[in-house]
Image: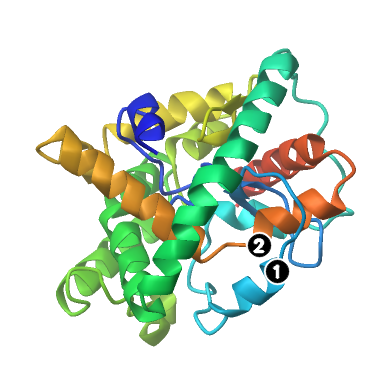
Amino acid sequence: MVVLLALTGCAHKRTAGGPADMRTPESGAPSPAAQVVRVSSSSATPAETAGGKADSGAAQATDDSEFSDDAYTDDEDFLDEDEDTEPAMDVPDPLAPFNRAMYVFNDRAYFWVLKPVALAYRKVAPKQFRLCVKNFFYNIAAPIRFANCLLQGKFTSAARELTRFFINSTVGCGGLNDLTPLYPDLQTHPEDLGQTFGRYGIGEGFYIVWPLLGPSSLRDTIGMVGDIFIDPVTYFNTTTIGIGTRALDMINLTSFRIGDYEAIKDAAIDPYEALRNGYLQYRRQQVSE
């Protein structure tokens, strides 16, 4: 995990698809756990880059079922794309050998490191505690979503983001509690610089898979770097704190999504292609909303 955080400049994008599934509670993130497209009935979240069979994934997922993610639109939601959705094959993949190698690397990192750590964390951390951590990280990433709403001309959404951030940061005890269910009009959606570029008509460029960060495109990669400068966590005063914060966010989000990646791996003929198409379809849907 330290390698991941070093590679990303201690900046884990929590608003749109990263390999930790993770990206924000609403965008939930990215991680090897966010590198997957569920090809079952619940197939979709850039959740996990992993490999193997669905080993009791359903039973593990049930453990967290009482905490609905309806209030969140995770970046990992691309795992909810239907299997019959038309593949997005028109984006070039000139780095296919590198991308497939990174997919395998992320796959191993998920099963050998991230998943075992997330399972251990889930055993010792109560679900309510983990949900509070998830809420906190989503709330603190509000400046990214707010800025990109403004850049896209979504002024109503920007007002919602600002209001939601204020309410959750005060009444919600620093963002530990999400009060959106009490105020349905304040529900928000993931917004990031990659989506903003897409709204301006900039194409994806080409597909790329980053170590530990998972699926992306040239446009989304540039956008992710830009979002780093808006993310408050980037300005935590020490590298150690920053790395620890990113690691906690990733592990916490993964603890809610154990089994998602396993399901797609078990069902897909070519998990790499399934992940690629699901990610591109999901991002296009986000840009069009």
What is the x, y in percent for residue 9? 31, 27
Is residue 253 positioned above or below 125 on the image? Answer: above
- Kind of residue sitting beneath label 2: Gly
- SS for tag 2? loop
- Front residue of this view, candidates 243 and 189: 243
Circle number at residue 162 = none
Q: Quadrant where the N terminus lies? A: top left
Snapshot quadrant of residue 63: bottom right
Snapshot quadrant of residue 91: top right
Q: Judge from the rendering whether residue 283 lies leftward or rightward of residue 116; answer left or right.
A: right
- Front residue of this view, candidates 278 and 283: 278
Q: Which residue is mark 2?
A: 259
Circle number at residue 56 = 1
Residue count near mark 2 (Cα–Cα under 10 Å), binned few <14, some 14–19, many ≥20: many
- Kind of residue sitting beneath label 1: Ser
Is residue 47 positioned above or below 125 on the image? Answer: above
What is the x, y in percent for residue 222? 46, 23
What is the x, y in percent for residue 81? 75, 56
Inspect this view and state whether residue 31 appears.
no
Point out the residue furthest to the top here. 94
Q: Judge from the rendering whether residue 255 lies leftward or rightward of residue 164; answer left or right.
A: right
Residue at x-position 61% and y-position 57%: 77
Q: Judge from the rendering whether residue 212 lies leftward or rightward of residue 35; answer left or right.
A: left
Whether tag 2 and tag 1 are in contact, CB under 8 A, the answer is yes
Inspect this view and state whether residue 277 appears.
yes
Q: Earlier in the sequence, mark 2 or mark 1?
A: 1
Q: Please identify, in this view, whether the residue under mark 2 or under mark 1 is nearer the observer.
A: 1
Q: Judge from the rendering whether residue 40 lies leftward or rightward of residue 27; answer left or right.
A: right
Residue at x-position 52% and y-position 39%: 195
What is the x, y in percent for residue 251? 42, 54
Residue at x-position 51% and y-position 42%: 18
Residue at x-position 71% and y-position 44%: 51
